[in-house]
Image (tube, grey):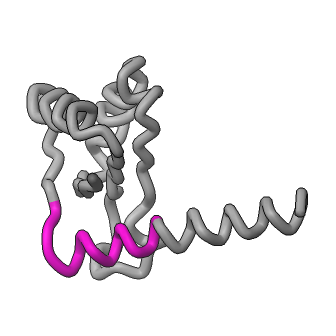
Amino acid sequence: MEVVYFYEEKDKKSVDKLLEEDFFKRLGPSAREAALMGTARKSGYYLYVKAEDPEKMKEALRRIEESKLPLAKLSGDEERQVIDYVHKEEEEAASGMGAIFG
C-alpha cells in the first residue's frame, strides 16, 4: 500500500518531528521537495508512505491523522505522478547499485 500527502514549507519542521518517531523510522517514509518532482506544485513537500503490511499502513495513517498536522492526502493524477516518480527513483538507485556491485 502506498499513500502520498502534501504539506507546505512552513510545516516542514513539524512533519520532520513526526517522522523522527521510532515507528516511522522503521517504516521509512520519505519526504521530497515538490519543485524537484516536475509536478504542478512549485513549493512544499510530498510525504510518501509505503507499507507492505496492511496493519502497519493502518497504524501509519492513524498516527498521521492523530498528529493533526496539515497534511493533505492526495489522490488521482497527482498522487499517481508522485508514486511513479518515487518508483522510477528507486529503480534507478537499484540499477546503479547493481552496476557498482554487479
Is residue 90 shown left or right of residue 80? right
Question: 44 or 52: which is nearer to us?
Answer: 52
Is residue 72 shown left or right of residue 48? left
Q: Looking at the image, is 25 positioned above or below residue 51?
A: above
Q: Position of residue 34 (x, y in %)?
A: 38, 66
Is residue 55 shown left or right of residue 94? left
| Main secondary structure along the magenta-highlighted residues | helix
Residue 76 occupies quadrant: bottom left
Residue 64 occupies quadrant: top left
Name of the residue lying farthest toward the top: 22
Question: 91 or 78: which is nearer to us?
Answer: 91
Question: 89 or 18: which is nearer to us?
Answer: 89
Query: Can you say which quadrant of the picture contains the C terminus?
Result: bottom right
Q: Residue 77 magenta-drawn? A: yes
At x 20%, y 29%, the residue is 59
At x 29%, y 31%, the residue is 14
At x 34%, y 66%, the residue is 43
Q: Position of residue 11 (x, y in %)?
A: 27, 41
Q: Position of residue 75 (x, y in %)?
A: 14, 68
Q: Report how many numbered discs are placed on residues in the image.
A: 0
Q: Looking at the image, is 68 positioned above or below residue 95?
A: above
At x 42%, y 71%, the residue is 35
Magenta region:
74-86
Q: Looking at the image, is 6 positioned above or below residue 55?
A: below
Residue 17 occupies quadrant: top left
Q: Position of residue 96 (x, y in %)?
A: 77, 67
Name of the residue lying farthest toward the right: 101
Q: Residue 22 magenta-drawn? A: no
